[in-house]
Image: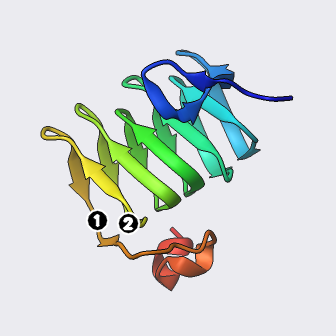
Amino acid sequence: MMLKKAKGHPEVEEMVAFLGKGTDFRGILHFQGTIRVDGRIEGEVITKDTLIVGDSAEIHGNLNVGTLISSGTITGNIVAAKKAQMIAPGTLTGDIVTPVLNIEEGFVMNGRCEMGKAVKQGADRLPAEAVSA
C-alpha cells in the first residue's frame, strides 16, 4: 500500500493508525507507516517510520523509531534514527539518541542527548542502565 505525504509535513507520511484519547495500550507496538498517539502506552514502540505523540499522550517505555514528533509526555529512552522534533507543552524524562534534534521553547527535557551523523537503530545505542529502565 502506497502512502501519501501528510499536508503541512512533507517528511511525514499520511497516518495509518490513530490511538485516541482514552486509549490504553500495554505491550510492544510494532508498525509501519505513521501513527498518532493521544492515549496512553505502557511498553515499547518499534518502527522505522514515524510516531506522532499528541499533547494528551502519555508514553511509559522505550521508543525505537525512525522519526519522532512529540508534544506529549514520554518517560523512557528514545532512539530516533532520522530525527526527533519535540514540541511544547511536551516533556521527556529519559535519554535520546538521534542525528537531528529540534526542541521548541517550552518543551521540558530531563535526560541526556547523543547526536551524530548517523544513528543505528537499536537498544545497543543507549547506555546499559537506560535500556533496563
Residue at the spot x=45%, y=28% of the render? 9
Residue 25 higher or lower than 60, as above or below: above
Which quadrant would the N terminus be assigned to in this image? top right
Residue 2 placement: quadrant: top right
| Amino acid at dot 1 | Gly
Residue 85 higher or lower than 56, as above or below: below
Label 2 belongs to which residue? 95
- Residue 111 badge: 1
Image location of residue 127, percent across then percent down: 46, 82
Between 81 and 126, the one lying in front of the other is 81
**What is the crowding at mark 1: few (fewer than 14 residues within 10 Å), some, or many (at least 20)?**
few
Q: Give SS at disc 2.
A: loop
- Residue 127 badge: none
Residue 42 placement: quadrant: top right
Q: Give SS at disc 1.
A: loop
Residue at the spot x=49%, y=31% of the render? 10
Residue at the extreme right: 1
Between 60 and 69, the one lying in front of the other is 69
Image location of residue 5, percent across then percent down: 60, 26
93 left or right, relative to 18: left
Image location of residue 117, percent across then percent down: 42, 75
Residue at the extreme bottom: 128
127 left or right, relative to 28: left
Image location of residue 49, percent across then percent down: 64, 46
**What is the crowding at mark 2: few (fewer than 14 residues within 10 Å), some, or many (at least 20)?**
many
First in sequence, mark 2 or 1: give its number.
2
Q: How many marks?
A: 2
Between 22 and 67, the one lying in front of the other is 67
Residue at the spot x=59%, y=74% of the render? 120
Q: Are marks 2 and 1 in contact (CB under 8 Å)?
A: yes
